[in-house]
Amino acid sequence: MTAATIEAPVVHRPGLGATVSQTLSMAWRQMVRIKHNPFELVDLSLSPIMFLLLFVYVFGGQMAGSTSDYLQYVLGGLIAQNAIFLTMYTGTGINADLRKGVYDRFRSLPIARSAPLAGKIFADMFKQVWSIVVMLGLGLLMGFELRSVAGAFLATLVLVVFALAISWISVLMGVVADSEEKVQIYAFVIIMPLTFTSSAFVDINTMPGFMQAWAKVNPVTHLADAMRGLLSFGPITEPLMWTFVWAVAIFAVTAPLAMRAYKRKMV
Amino acid sequence: MSQDNAIETEGLTKHFGDLVALDHVDLTARAGTVLGVLGPNGAGKTTMVRMLATLSQPTAGTARVGGYDIVKDGAKVRTFIGLTGQFAGVDELLTGEENLRFIGRLLGMPTRDAKARARELLAQFNLSDAAEKPAKAYSGGMRRRLDLAASLVGRPRILFLDEPTTGLDPRARGELWGLVRGLVADGTTVLLTTQYLEEADQLAHEIAVIDHGKVIATGTPTQLKAKIGGQSLRIQPEDHAQLDTVRELVAARYPELEPAVEAGAITVGVNDDGIMPALAADLRDRGIALTEFHLGLSSLDEVFLTLTGRRTETEDPEAESAAQTDQEPAK
């Protein structure tokens, strides 16, 4: 005999529409968090501003003969590097939520189990756009000559797509690691060398052979080249293509792994 | 199984590696009542709640919540349950109103309805004045109330409260008890875990005492008190100097009992109602005048002492750290 069954008091709209709506609600929560803690945006802006000023005015003369020439070269690279660093916050945020009671509450609600993750990743794209605006704005103040306005919009779009894909590496770390600090350490150990062994800051032809071999395939090189091409000078099509290939490949590998780890966390 | 049971578990078991957190637990909660799950830290209370709220899956055994299997029909179960866990489930950066509106939006309410429901709950939980303050500015009691309110946005018919008053001062605790009573009066079934005997006694219709993952006793608070150790006899002689004489009299008649001397009175746990007239005769023969001679039900604290051989206050720090690992099973 079955026990008394209970009908749901809330009207549900199962399916993709509901999942999208729940994801947007989750993203809304993240945006409200920024509204209550606007310092987060200052925090986000400090490191790219510092990097841009230091790289251009300290290394610029030596690197490219003049600070203005180096600015034309390095801005795209710095934007690429910063975007990759920013994805780390997706993982640390998810890790913090998982260890508090917030995710328990989410999981007791009749919502798609992917919604909290998707909402967080989605909201973090706002931070990506914010950062590129800050860096581009400062660059222009420093005398950067923009190739075209359309290029700037396209660069933002490409950056967001690439960040969406590689965020899953960060999500995976955030789900697996048992503390925020560990996510930061993992991220630092991977992202720092990855971004420096690329064309982000220097012409890779100046590197020794073995390093060149790596730098040529490094996804950061392609992203940095694509940014440089769209914003400043240089080829566009080929680096764009490789950027997308890398984005798809990284997404295809890490998203299922992250989702699997996340679901296992639910058991 | 019965038509009236909101929660039923059969042999519910959870292992974390070698640790048996919950061991073949059979429990039922009738619809519209409060089932109190009483036990010290590390007893398996949180483990059980997490499984019933579909947050984790049993190693063995089954459970039905609202008539639906927690494993097979977890998604269905989530549509009519509410959970207030031991760790705050509200976003501290968001205001009270935003926290509740957020849950309403997640549940698919139109923005206007979500706002109205948030206002309604804030008023009901006496949080209207703090509606626009971020949750991190709330006191402990306010935060628990907001947490409870957040679990009620979708009007759940079955509510899980995992140690809802742990760490609260007596006034905040009393307020929360009042809120829970109100919910039950409206027909909500509540499963409440607690380490406070008084809380189970105050709120629960039925109590299950669990220890080391096992149910060691069940019954109504009254049944439980009557069943184990039964009653407590208190004898206070007019003259304190006669305390020892009284104790000797009790010991002589019932050598198996262990009378305790406390605050000028003798207390002794007894099972036999016949002890009263027999002792009364002994005391009269010795000419001992009494100010108190009283047979009452034992407190739940004494019940726990009888059942487990230890007081609830003596918490085992190792058991507590084992409870923490509830969060993440060893792989």
Image (spheres, coloured by chain):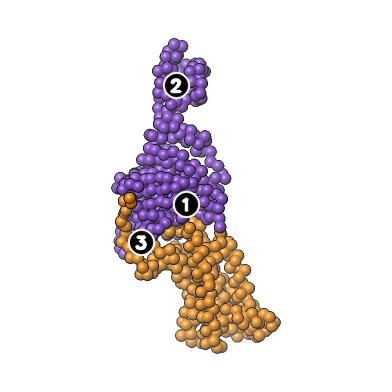
Chain colours: A orange, B purple
Q: In x, y percent, where is residue A162?
A: 51, 77
Are the numbered discs 3 and 2 placed on the same chain, yes or no? yes
Of labels 3 and 2, earlier in sequence is 3
Residue under label 1:
B60
Q: Residue at 50% x, 17% y: name it.
A: B252
The x and y percentages for residue A12 are 32, 63
| Quarter occupied by residue B135 | bottom left
Task: Identify which residue, B278 or B17, lies in the foreground.
Answer: B17
Q: Which residue is mark 2?
A: B235
Chain of the residue on which disc 3 is drawn: B
Q: Is residue A71 visible?
A: no
**Three-letter amino acid code of the residue under disc 1:** Ala
Point out residue B307 in the picture as x, y percentages from the top left corner.
48, 35
A250 relative to B122 in the view: left or right: right
Mark 3 sits on what residue?
A: B107
Q: How dense is the environment of label 2, judged by Cα within 10 Å: few (below 14), some, or many (20 and up)?
A: many
- Per the image, label 2 sits on a secondary structure element best described as strand
Looking at the image, residue A44 lies above or below residue A266: below
What residue sits 47% from the left and 75% below the top?
A129
| Callout 3 amino acid | Leu
